[in-house]
Amino acid sequence: MVRHFGRMNAADHDRIKAAIAAAEGRTSARFVMTVLPQSDRYTLYPVIWAALAALVTGGILGWFLPQFPLRDGFAVQVAAFLLLSIVFEWRPVRPLLVPAVAKRHHASQFAHREFAARILAHPERSGGVLLFISEAERYVELLADAKTHAAVGEVEWNRIVGQFVSRMRAGAPVEAVLDAVGACAELLERHHPN
């Protein structure tokens, strides 16, 4: 399933959907691809940063203008908090407020939930693989059931992810996805033939 992926046109989406369908047709295992524009809304970060900025504003007022009335200082803090909360909610700004480690953590958690729902919850297939891509976090992960993961090995999964990242950096997102889907299909066909 391709939910979203940058500036791809309808023909690109069709090529990817066809490659995914072909991958699933070559194996008894389940193959799913999920592409998200963002793994989380990160709703707390704008509020946290706005609150910290409002506290710093109050501190600066108190330090440099000790004669400033407390009531007015509180009003300035509230105004700063409200204004910055709105500014920090703006879609291009919000991701900049989130530490990279938190972005990776949220993306990984989403990938694992998606894997549980889309692969593990379907016992009629003999295992499966999820190719998970989160655009805003620039995060990609390949998850496989325990049997498939053990049969293929970490090195092979990392190679596919590495090639995907290289193709993406080269500005070829469609080819990156098609190559990753094809590589996963080969491995699934080898370890879970129809």
Image (spheres, rainbow, N blue to C red):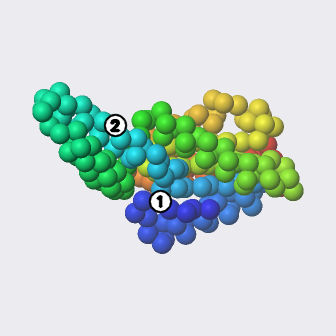
Q: Is residue 84 visible?
A: no
Check contact, mark 2 vs mark 1: CB within 8 A. no
For mark 2, does the 10 Å Cα neighbourhood hold few (<14), some (14 to 19), or many (20 or more) residues? Answer: few
Disc sitting over residue 5 in the figure:
1
Q: How many marks?
A: 2
Q: Nearer the viewer, residue 128 or 188?
A: 128
Mark whose residue sits in front, 2 or 1: 2
| Residue at left offset 73%, top offset 48% | 116
Spot occupied by residue 122 in the image (x, y as percentages of width and height): 81, 55
Identify the residue under disc 2: 52
**Amino acid type, callout 2:** Leu
Task: From the viewer's perspective, tell me whether residue 187 is left or right of residue 28.
Answer: left
Spot occupied by residue 154 in the image (x, y as percentages of width and height): 66, 30
The image quadrant where one finds the N terminus is bottom right
Q: Quadrant of residue 166?
A: top left
| Residue at left offset 54%, top offset 55% | 35
Q: Secondary structure at mark 1?
A: loop
Q: Secondary structure at mark 2?
A: helix
* Residue sticking out furthest to the top: 63
Distance, label 2 to label 1, CA atoms, is: 34 Å
Task: From the viewer's perspective, tell me whether residue 126 is left or right of residue 170.
Answer: right
Q: Is residue 167 above or below residue 18?
A: above
| Residue at left offset 37%, top offset 54% | 89
Q: Nearer the viewer, residue 181 or 37?
A: 37
Q: Is residue 150 visible?
A: yes
**Amino acid type, callout 1:** Phe
